[in-house]
Amino acid sequence: MPYSELMDSKETIGKTSEDPLFQFCALEYRPQDWSIASSRGESVILLALRDERGSHRFLVDPEVRTIVQDRDLDYLEELLKDFIERAKTDPAALFNQICSLAVGPLVTRATGSNLSEFPTIQKQTLHFVPITALA
């Protein structure tokens, strides 16, 4: 289910007692020439979600191939293919790994249980699609 539908459904990411508790992890793309000074916070390309029942969703920006620089594209496409395969067999381990990426062109930007605390990321990820849609 696309994140926009998730936000419109009963399964919103929030902290009310009626809603399932979600954990999220947002990953941003950082090209080789990235610097904090040049970052505008608009480079989140992947969102991992886990609900209280242990269900996982991995959503990606459908424009990922146009966002990522050519020199990083092959690496990132292989990484996303790996995520697709690992999500089928061990989504919990994949989620945990995604939430701690700190090296390379794809790094953890934010984690938590209330995406509304990160309005820029929340707005940016509304159009994301399931990672399997890129397969």
Image: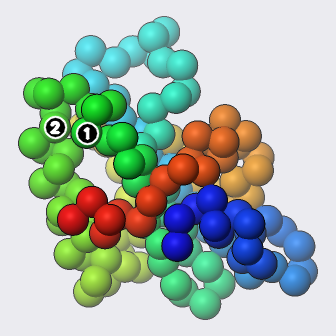
Q: Which residue is mark 2?
A: 73
Q: Crowding near pointer 1: few (<14 within 10 Å), some, many (20+)?
A: some
* Coordinates of residue 88 in the picture (x, y in percent): 28, 83
Q: Which residue is mark 1?
A: 65
Q: CA distance from mark 2 to mark 1?
A: 7 Å
N-term-proximal mark, 2 vs 1? 1
Q: Is residue 123 left or right of residue 48?
A: right
Nearer-the-camera pick, 36 or 56? 56
Q: Is residue 121 above or below residue 7?
A: above
Which residue is found at the position 40% from the left and 54% from the top?
60
* Residue 115 seen in the figure: yes
Dot 2, how many residues are within 10 Å of its Cα: few (below 14), some (14-19), or many (20+)?
some
Q: Is residue 19 above or below residue 28?
A: below
Q: Quadrant of the C terminus?
A: bottom left
- Inspect the image, locate mark 1, and give the three-letter code of the amino acid beneath it: Arg
Is residue 107 visible in the rendered image? The answer is no
Q: Residue at x 36, y 41 (%)?
A: 63
Place residue 35 in its image quadrant: top left
The answer to which of 65 and 27 lies nearer the viewer is 65
Image coordinates of residue 30 in percent, x first then y, are: 34, 29
